[in-house]
Amino acid sequence: MRNLTSKKIIENFDCGINELNTYLKQYAFENDLNNIGKTYLLVDEDHILGYFTLANGSITHDDLPIEYRKIPKYPIPITRLARLGVDINYQNKGYGRKLIQSVIRIVFNTSLSVASYAIVVDVKPQSKSFYEYMGFEKLNNDLQYFYSMKKIAKYFQNIKDNKK
Ligand SMILES: CC(C)(COP(=O)(O)OP(=O)(O)OC[C@H]1O[C@@H](n2cnc3c(N)ncnc32)[C@H](O)[C@@H]1OP(=O)(O)O)[C@@H](O)C(=O)NCCC(=O)NCCS
């Protein structure tokens, strides 16, 4: 994984969704500099295989499914997976999973110093099944999915157990 440090490398990226291509080419670099969205690239030599963007955010108590509501009713800090895309030439080769694993690792490490209750993503209709397959759960609306920090902790515990 690599941080977005130059605009050059992103010129040919195409994940099949214009909005995500345009974000990477026109806005990601500035947003990164302005600290309103951190973009990470998965790169193979000079090709971008995929990217994602992370930012802090919050959700309301009511956004959570009932079984997750045993916490105070403050706005709940989360990490927003604001963008995710894999280039069409590299889709269905496991890179989307790889990007999600990187997101989980970054968010877990950050949450050790700054609290985050979950990763939250605004889903497009065509990507719902991908996030469900990756273990994300629905928030209390049709537009957002989440992956709780408790689940992330279990994810790392399982990796540890499998190494024993
Ligand atoms: C959605 C996207 C990120 C998936 O990336 P990918 O590299 O093609 O996915 P992977 O090859 O890593 O797939 C990992 C697993 O998810 C499954 N999967 C992939 N796309 C899926 C989908 N749309 N629905 C359900 N499962 C899916 C794969 O079959 C694979 O399963 P396996 O490991 O059991 O074989 C990619 O297709 C993409 O960039 N699409 C356009 C942009 C987009 O929709 N982004 C999300 C916006 S919110």
Image (tube, rainbow, N blue to C red):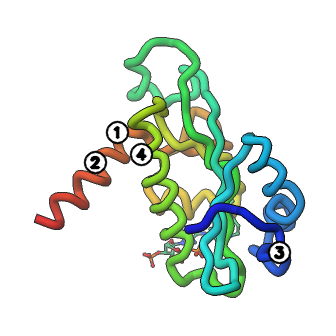
Whole-percent x and y of residue 57?
64, 32
Whole-percent x and y of residue 24?
80, 63
Instruction: Name the element at disc 3.
Output: helix
What residue is rendered at 57% in x and 33% in y? 140
Q: In the rendering, which numbered label is found on residue 8?
A: 3
Between disc 2 and disc 3, the foreground one is 3
Q: Are marks 1 and 2 in contact (CB under 8 Å)?
A: yes
Callout 1, which amino acid? Lys
Between disc 4 and disc 3, the foreground one is 3
Between disc 3 and disc 1, the foreground one is 3
Q: Is residue 127 above or below residue 114?
A: below
Q: Which residue is labeled 1 in the image? A: 150
* Name of the residue lying farthest toward the left: 164
Q: Is residue 24 visible?
A: yes
Q: CA distance from mark 1 to mark 2?
A: 6 Å
Callout 4, which amino acid? Phe
Q: CA distance from mark 2 to mark 3?
A: 39 Å
Instruction: Mark 1 or mark 4: name the one nearer the start of the chain.
Output: 4
Callout 2, which amino acid? Lys
Q: Which residue is labeled 4 in the image? A: 108
Instruction: Mark 2 or mark 3: name the one nearer the start of the chain.
Output: 3
Left/right placement of residue 150 relative to residue 65 reads left
Between disc 1 and disc 4, the foreground one is 4
Q: In the rendering, which numbered label is found on residue 154?
A: 2
What quarter of the picture does the C terminus occupy? bottom left
What residue is rendered at 15% in x and 59% in y? 161
Q: CA distance from mark 1 to mark 4?
A: 10 Å
Callout 3, which amino acid? Lys
Q: Nearer the viewer, residue 89 or 47?
A: 47
